[in-house]
Structures are given as structure tokens and as C-alpha cells.
Image: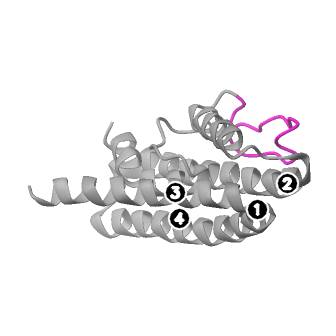
């Protein structure tokens, strides 16, 4: 149970960034191929009914609606959405692997495993930033203001949450 709890504790920022709507990954993905859908042209390592991908897709759908993505913005949106899904899937796979090996890891292996997850999150964030920048430049001024406000609101909630936990 601890690996799932760790996932909930450390993945929220990555998933929020991936979906720009905020929330933690609820469960680990299963290692099965995902069928392509109109939103996903490529395959991923998670099952079609993976709670991780369901959660990401739900957040992406909500964001798409809030921003009012137009036909002219669809290509950039699809790129951003696919990177979001791929990122969530790759992190879930690392947590799943960590969970499978945790009982036999020594302390150094445990730290290396967690370092690999953190490195992947940083790499994923760079990929997501590039995809989001492409999308952001396609948005009109109203949409940009909306998403700017969403990011600010999330950052404020995140800081308040961290302050609350820092107090002990």
C-alpha cells in the first residue's frame, strides 16, 4: 500500500501540470497496450480502462471545455493531450515497477528508484512545457488569460497546502 500512497504524495504536481486542472494520480496503470482513439493517435503502456488514463482524460476534457478549444487549436491540443497521457503512463509504470520491487530493495536501490522517478518527472515536465507552449501560442487572448488564472489559482492552493503541512 505504501507505493500507492507515495504515488499520491508525489505525483500531484506532475499530474496537475499534465492536465492543468490539479489532482493526484488515483491508481497505478496496468502494463497493457491502449487502443487508439480520436484523442490518442499513438499507443501507450496503460490499459484502456486504466484509472490513471481515465483520470487524465477526465481532466483534459474539463480543461478543453473550460478553454473552449477551437478547430484551429485542435492540432496543438492533441499534441498537448498526448504528451499529458504519455507522461502519466510513464510515471505510473515507474511507480508500478517500484512497488513490485520495493520488498527486495536495499536502501540505496530504494533511493535510486525514487531518483529515477524524479528524473523522469523532470524530463516529462520539459516535454509537457514544450507541448503546452505550442498550444498556448495558438490560444486567443481570452483563453490565455483563463489558463493563466487557472495556473495562478493552482499555485496559490499548492503553496497554502505546503504551508499548512510545514507547520507540522
Q: Position of residue 19 (x, y in %)?
A: 60, 49
What separation in Å lies between label 4 and label 1 (alpha carbons)? 20 Å
Of the two numbered discs 2 and 4 in the rendering, the one whose residue sits closer to the viewer: 2
Q: Which is nearer the N-term, disc 1 or disc 3?
A: 1
Q: Answer above or below: position of 36 versus 105.
A: above
In the picture, measured across the screen, residue 16 lies left or right of residue 128, that is left
Say what secondary structure mark 2 lies in: helix
Q: Callout 3: few (<14), some (14-19), or many (20+) C-alpha neighbours within 10 Å?
A: few
Report if residue 11 is visible in the image: no
Asked if labels 2 and 1 touch by Cβ distance under 8 angstroms, the answer is: yes
Residue 145 on image: x %, y %: 61, 60
Q: Is residue 41 magenta?
A: yes
Relative horizontal placement of residue 71, taking residue 26 as reference (left or right): right
Which of the two labelled residues, at mark 2 and mark 4, occupies the earlier sequence position?
2
Distance from disc 1 to disc 3, alpha carbons, whole Å, reads 16 Å
Look at mark 1 in the image and give the residue it sits on.
135
Frontmost of labels 4 and 3 is: 3
Rendering coords of residue 59 (x, y %): 60, 39
In the image: residue 12, left or right of residue 144: left
The boundaries of the magenta stretch are 32-48
Marks 3/2: CA distance? 20 Å
Lower position in the chain sequence, tag 3 or tag 2: 2
- Mark 4 = which residue? 121
| Image quadrant containing the C terminus | bottom left
Can you identify the residue that label 2 sits on? 73
**Crowding near pointer 2: few (<14 within 10 Å), some, many (20+)?**
some
Q: Residue at x 69, y 55 (%)?
A: 143
* Mark 4 Cα-neighbour bin, 10 Å: few <14, some 14–19, many ≥20: many
Q: Residue at x 81, y 45 (%)?
A: 43
Q: How many angstroms separate mark 2 from mark 4 (CA)?
A: 26 Å
Q: Nearer the viewer, residue 99 or 152?
A: 152
Amino acid at each position: 500500500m505504501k507505493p500507492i500512497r507515495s504515488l499520491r504524495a508525489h505525483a500531484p504536481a506532475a499530474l496537475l501540470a499534465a492536465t492543468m486542472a490539479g489532482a493526484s494520480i488515483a491508481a497505478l496503470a496496468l502494463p497493457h497496450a491502449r487502443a487508439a482513439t480520436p484523442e490518442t493517435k499513438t499507443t501507450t503502456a496503460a490499459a484502456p480502462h486504466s484509472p490513471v488514463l481515465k483520470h487524465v482524460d477526465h481532466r483534459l476534457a474539463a480543461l478543453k471545455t473550460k478553454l473552449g478549444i477551437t478547430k484551429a487549436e485542435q492540432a496543438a491540443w492533441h499534441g498537448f493531450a498526448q504528451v499529458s497521457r504519455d507522461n502519466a503512463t510513464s510515471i505510473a509504470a515507474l511507480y508500478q515497477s517500484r512497488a513490485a520491487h520495493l520488498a527486495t530493495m536495499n536502501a540505496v536501490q530504494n533511493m535510486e528508484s525514487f531518483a529515477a522517478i524524479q528524473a523522469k518527472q523532470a524530463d516529462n515536465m520539459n516535454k509537457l512545457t514544450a507541448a503546452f507552449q505550442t498550444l498556448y501560442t495558438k490560444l486567443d487572448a481570452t483563453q490565455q488569460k483563463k489558463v493563466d488564472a487557472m495556473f495562478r489559482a493552482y499555485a496559490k492552493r499548492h503553496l497554502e497546502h505546503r504551508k499548512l503541512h510545514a507547520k507540522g
